[in-house]
Amino acid sequence: MVYIVIFLLFLNQYFINTSLHYMKNFFLSLLSCPKSGSPLKIKKNKNGKSFLITESGNKFKIQNKVIRFENNKNYSKNFGHQWQKFSKIQLDSFNGTNISEDRFFLATGWNKSEMKNKLILDVGCGSGRFTEVALKYGAKVVAIDYSKSVDVAQKNLGKYKNALFIQSNIYSLPFKKKKFDFVFCLGVLQHTPNVEKAFKCLPDLLKKKGKICVDYYWKRPKTLLNSKYLFRPITKRIPNEKLFKIIKFIFPFFYGISNLISLLPYGIYLRRLLPISNYKGIYKLSNQQHYEWALLDTYDMLAPTYDNPQTKKDVIKWMKDCSMKKVRCLHAGHLIVRGIKI
C-alpha cells in the first residue's frame, strides 16, 4: 500500500512538472525581441537568475516572476503607484462581487464557454481584475502592463500556471504576430500619448478569426463637462505620492457631500459635478469597500499623465484601417469597440 501511495505521488509530481515545462515552452514560443524581432531563449547567469536573450545579445530580466522588457520610469507610473496601494479591491475574488466579471462580458460580448484553453492577451492588466476573469474560465492568459502594477497582478494571480506576466510598452510589444485567439484592452488606451497608434499595435497579434475588444472614454460634451478636467492640468503635474496624500486628506469631506447629494432627486447624477468618484447605489459593496473604491477611482481620474477621450467615428475607422470585420461600437459605461480578424 505504501509503495502504491509513493508511486501515485511520484506520478502526480511528474505530470505537474511536465505541465509546467510545457507551459513555459508554450509561452516562450509566443515571444520575440521587441527591438529586433528575433527569437528569445531562457538563460541563467552565474547567480542562477534567469533572463531572456537573443542571438544578437539583447537581454531582458525575469524578476519576481515577471518578464521585464521595460522599467518603471515612464508615463504610467501613477498606475503602478495606485495598484500597489489598492492591490485587491477590484478583484471579484476579494470583494465578493461579480463587478469585474460583469463588466468584462458586457464589454467583450464573448461567451464564457468559448474561452477555455484559448490564448488571450490582456493589455494593461493593472492589478489583474480582468485577467482573473479570463483565467476563471480556463483561458491561457498573457497579462502585460507598462507600469509596476504588473507585479501586483503577478502576486495576486501567480498561483495560476496558465498565466504569464510581462512588463512591456504597448508601442513595442514583444510578441510574434497572429498568435492570440482574443485580445482585450479595457480602461487603458485613453491613458496613452497616441491612442490611435496604441490601438493599431494590437490587431496584428490576432489569429485569423481572432476577436478583439477595446474601450475608451467617449469624446462628447457630457464627458468633457466632467469636473476632473478642471483640475487635471494641475493634478497630473503633482508627484504621485504627494497627490495621493492631498486627495486622501480632502476626500472624506467631498465624499460626505457626495453622499448627501445622492439623497436628492437625480442625486446620483448631480454628484458627478464633484471631482470625486462615488458608486453607492451602483455597486453592491460594503461601506468600507465603497469608500476605498471611490478613493481609488478619484486618484485614477486626477493622476494620469494622459486622458484622451475618443469619438465613435475615429475608433470605428481605426478598426477598419486594420482590416477588422464585424465591427461593432456601443456604449456600456465606456465607448466599446469589438471586431474580428478576417
Image (cartoon, grey):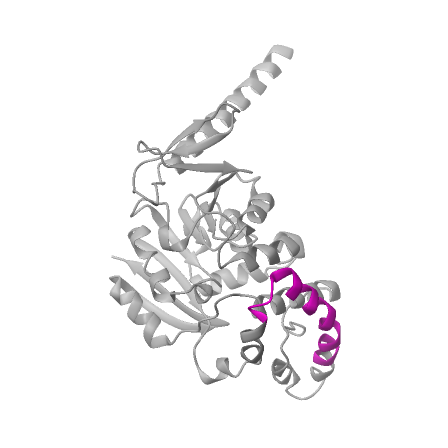
In this view of the protein, can residue 1 be seen by the observer? no
In depth, the one of 43 and 7 nearer the eye is: 43
Q: How far across and how far down the image is residue 215, in percent?
A: 43, 66
Left or right for 297, reference 36 = right
- Please identify the dominant SS of the magenta region: helix
Image quarter hosting the C terminus = bottom left
Magenta residues, start to end: 235-258
- Residue 259 visible in the shown view: yes
* x then y, percent, for residue 325: 27, 63
Residue at point 37%, 64% (across, down): 338
Above/below status of 326 relative to 255: above
- Residue 199 on the magenta segment: no
Q: In front: 196, or 46?
A: 46
* Relative image position of residue 298 (x, y in whole percent): 62, 69
Asked if the magenta segment contains residue 239, the reply would be: yes
Residue located 54% across and 40% down the image = 160
Picture residue at 64% right of the left edge, 64% below the top: 296
Where 165 sits versus 248, above or below?
Answer: above
